[in-house]
Image (cartoon, rainbow, N blue to C red):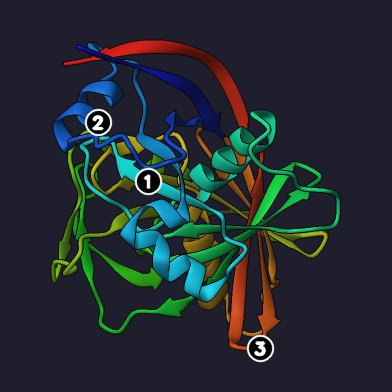
Amino acid sequence: MTEIAFTKGQGTGNDFVIVADPEGELDLTDEQIAALCDRRFGIGADGLLRVVRSARLPEGAASLGEEPDAEWFMDYRNADGSKAEMCGNGIRVFVHYLLESGLAELPAGSTLPIGTRAGVRDVMRSETGYQVDLGRWRAEPGDPLVTARGLSVPRPGLGIDVGNPHVVVALASEDELDGLELSAKPHVDPVPPHGANVEFVVPHEPLVKDGVGRVRMRVFERGVGETLSCGTGVAATALAVRDWAGRGAPDHWRVEVPGGVLGVRMFPAEDGEHVALSGPAVLVYSGTVSLA
C-alpha cells in the first residue's frame, strides 16, 4: 500500500480530490483515480486535480512554450480516470489550493498563468472568488440532436468548444428541466469524436435584468455523469443562449446551477473574442489515503 496526502475542494458543488505532486513523481492509474473518486468506497469527487510543475511532465512543455511563467500544470482527470482538456471550476479550486498551500502568490490586480491540456489559462481574483479567462471559444459546425431520458423527442443542440467540447440544448420550461433523468447518459447524434459535456438550459423570465442575462442549467459531464456544476459548461451555455437571443444580447451572464451561481463575461482580445468564468473556490478538508 502507498499512502498519499490529499485535499478535498469544491467550486459550486463540483468537487475534486487534490493531490500535490510538484516533481511529477506520482503515476496514478485510471483505476486508482476512479477508486479515489468513488463516492461509496473512496473519498468521493467529480474528478482529480494533480498539482505538478509544468517542467516535470511532457504535457507541460507546451504550456511553458506558450507562457514561460506557467510554472504549474493542472493535470485534471475525470472521475473515471480519463484525461480532460480543461475544467472551469477545477482551475479555480486548483489556484486556491496553490495560494493556500504557499506554492504560488496572486496579488490583487495580477494574473496567475496555469498550464492545462487546452493551453495556458490566466486566473485572477474576483469579487466572488476567482475569474479565469477560458480563452478564445468557437461554435462547432453541424446540427446535433440530443436524446435524453425525460424528453419526449430529441432536441437540437449547439456545439460550443471552450477548450473542451460541449453541446447545449434549450428546453421549453422549468418542468422539462426538472423532469430530466440524468442518471442515464444523453445520446448525441452524430456522436462527437471526443465525446462532449451536454448542458440543458432554460432562460429566466425576463431573460435580461439590469443588463445581465440569466439562465438555469443542468449538465451531464463526460466521464462523470450529472454534476452539481460545470464551469466550462456554464460558459458554453451563456455563449449558446446569447447566440439564440440574437442581436443586442448582453455579454454578461448569471448562470444558476444546482450547486450555486456562476458569472460569465465575453470580451474582445487580440486573437478574437474570449470568455471568462467567475465564481467561488473552497477547500473542504485534508487527509491521507492508502492506494492499492
Relative to 229, residue 57 above or below: below
Mark 3 is on which residue type?
Answer: Glu
How crowded pointer 1 is (Cα within 10 Å; few <14, some 14-19, many 20+) is rated as many
Give the residue number, with chain letter if any, for mark 1: 76
User: In which quarter of the view is residue 93 placed?
Assistant: top right
The C terminus lies in which quarter of the figure?
top left
How crowded pointer 2 is (Cα within 10 Å; few <14, some 14-19, many 20+) is rated as many
For image coordinates 45% across by 49% down, the residue present is 74
Residue 98's tag is none
How crowded pointer 3 is (Cα within 10 Å; few <14, some 14-19, many 20+) is rated as few
Let me know if residue 136 appears in the view.
no
For image coordinates 34% across by 79% down, the residue present is 140
**Marks 3 and 2, how far apart at CA:** 38 Å
In this rendering, would 78 be left or right of 131? left
Tag 3 or tag 1, which sits nearer the N-term?
A: 1
User: In which quarter of the view is residue 207 placed?
Assistant: bottom right
Mark 1 is on which residue type?
Answer: Tyr
* Secondary-structure class at tag 3: loop
Mark 2 is on which residue type?
Answer: Ile
- The image position of residue 34, as x and y in percent, is 21, 29
CB atoms of marks 2 and 1 within 8 Å: no
Give the residue number, with chain letter if any, for mark 3: 270
**Marks 2 and 1, how far apart at CA:** 11 Å
For image coordinates 19% across by 68% down, the residue present is 192
Relative to 255, residue 292 above or below: above
**Marks 1 and 3, how far apart at CA:** 28 Å
In this rendering, would 201 be left or right of 135? left
The N terminus lies in which quarter of the figure?
top left
User: In which quarter of the view is residue 111 placed?
Assistant: bottom right
Give the residue number, with chain letter if any, for mark 2: 33
* Secondary-structure class at tag 1: strand
* Secondary-structure class at tag 2: helix
